[in-house]
Image (cartoon, grey):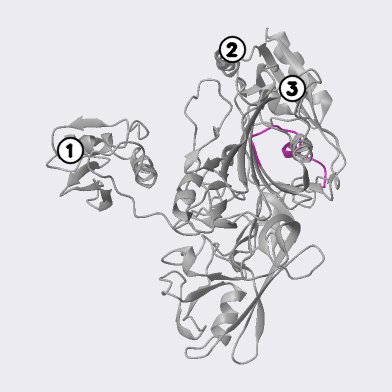
Amino acid sequence: MAANKMPLGSAGQTLTAGPVSTLMPGVTFQELTQGYASNVWSVWAWRVGGPETYGNQTTAQALVTELSGLGFASRLDTLTAFAAADTAGGVVGYAARVGSFAPQQMNEAVTLLASLVSAGYQGRVIYTAEDGIPSEGPWEVRVVRVDADAKVRLKAVHGASVSASKTVRSMAVASGALVAVNGGEFDIKTMSGHSGYEVPQGLYVQDDVLLSAANNGRTALLLEGAGQRVRITEASSSLRIKAADGAERNVDGVNRVPSRVLGCGGVGGDTLLVDGVATPTLKPWRNMICTDPNEIIIFRPEWGAATPAPWPGVTSSVDVVVNGNWVVQELRSPAGGAIPTGGRVLQGIGTGADWLQAHAHVGEMLTPTASITDASGAPVTSPTLSGVSGGGPALVRGGTKSINIGANGMTSFTGAPNLSSVQRHPRTLAGVTASGQFLLVTVDGRNPGRSVGLTWSEAADLMLWLGATEAVGLGSGGDTAMVVNNALSNSPRDTWNTQDTIPYERAMATAVVVVPNDAQPAPVSTIAAGATGWDVPLNEALVSLQAQISYLSAATAAAIGQLGAGTSLPLKNVGSVPAATPTGGVLYVEGGVLKYRGSNGTITTLGPA
């Protein structure tokens, strides 16, 4: 690692390196800062109902000319992608931009946007560092190094269930982690076509148990595998089920809603809507939703208490309930119902449902098989294997910058680069050095005054500078979070903003954690009498309810006050619990226990007060 500067910005910049903190023998943490704000705020303009980005320069220039004629100071910006290892670079598109304001003048851009909308156009405020154009930063980078012989376990984890998200901090506390970062991307609530469950996108393995099938061919971070503590490879998974009568069939996935393949890269029968046409594909396509009307999905207890009801439009479905020995206990149709303790449920739709009804009989045993393989097709399973994918592309391979956006479905359907290979965002990165040292790195972004994030090309350069011989991007953008000793160490941002001073912790599907060998799981959350500070699990429960709660009793206010300022619940305080439950519910203390009573009368116990 060079001492003078990170490979970001111009040559004249100076690196400010914070002290190296030893978290435990063999595990260190360091903060690095560099650069200064150099880009501008503008308004990205487009016609109502039209695209943000134009593929045709003449069309984009016509809009710029039109806006200029109305008195808006307009220009044409060209969006250009770098050349990746498997995808040619070049112009991605053209954008009409209006105005140019200094980094501290976001409000002026907001005012200009309002004027543009009043004139009959659409737009959004943009800080031009997002475009991936040359920038002087600034950058805030946090680096955790885990020596090859450190007495820790490297794992991928989830929250209370695979189907529901939790913050990285919550998952760190629950797993006893010394360090945690966000894992792969997932079915986020704000995604178009959200399934209703915040499940991982692509591969997720914990202790050699496949909890989410791969988007086959995407780059994965594998941990504690046979012979390699850290490995980065393009991974695939395969599942099959065999009935007692000898019939066999592919299983399409694990712990996800049947018919809906987030990230694509499935095993057969999948189609992606391309220009309005259902197009067959087995390739992975990041954040895209393929569909398959004929599937079998395995639901494990880690999913949650019950299997989902059929997706809208599914007319034929069945649940096959098996015990821990895979002996069929019952068939349910339509699908949707309890997952037995220690058991599994196979949910079939379409011809998948037909196969299960024909071959799965009560009292007979089913035989499942599963494999996880690398880019060469060799198995990678081991008793301690954990892993995630579904984030970014590979960045470094064999000590050389090598970014495979094509293999990770981060292009258009024709294979041309798209905006994901252009833009700067917050990044979470993982890598390994020649000595076997594991690197976990976060780079904050979306904040012109503190850190603007990285393009994928810049991320590869940074990981090489840090000494990585292999590296991969994990979830990025608002996902990016690093927790050290149960404290959030970075400043996650969901949007570009100069005024948002409170870090936004996004709930995630998975996290990558570093757990000391002698760590114990966190105890049940409690607030001791007279305690001060921030009780993380209980605070998370409170914050998740704050949009619903209208009233707060005086007793509850006192209990929450023991947590410190971290709760920041903007609630009305009343002297006692209202006689009638108000709209939105009420938070109250009863018998020393903190509870929430919803508008429908349902009471949720949040923890001892």
Q: Nearer the viewer, residue 139 or 298?
A: 139
Rendered residue at 51%/88% (across/down): 361
Numbered badge on residue 555 = 1
Q: Which residues are magenta?
A: 414-428
Q: Secondary structure at mark 2?
A: loop
Percent coordinates x, y for residue 76 in the rendering: 78, 19
Residue contact between numbered discs 3 and 1, judged by CB atoms under 8 Å:
no
Q: Nearer the viewer, residue 4 or 479?
A: 4
Q: Secondary structure at mark 3?
A: loop
Q: Secondary structure at mark 1?
A: helix
Percent coordinates x, y for residue 26 in the rendering: 63, 48
Numbered badge on residue 132 = none
Percent coordinates x, y for residue 555 in the rendering: 17, 38
Numbered badge on residue 135 = 3
Which label's residue is closer to the chain start, 3 or 1? 3
The correct choice, above or below, for 237 with respect to 544 in the image is: below
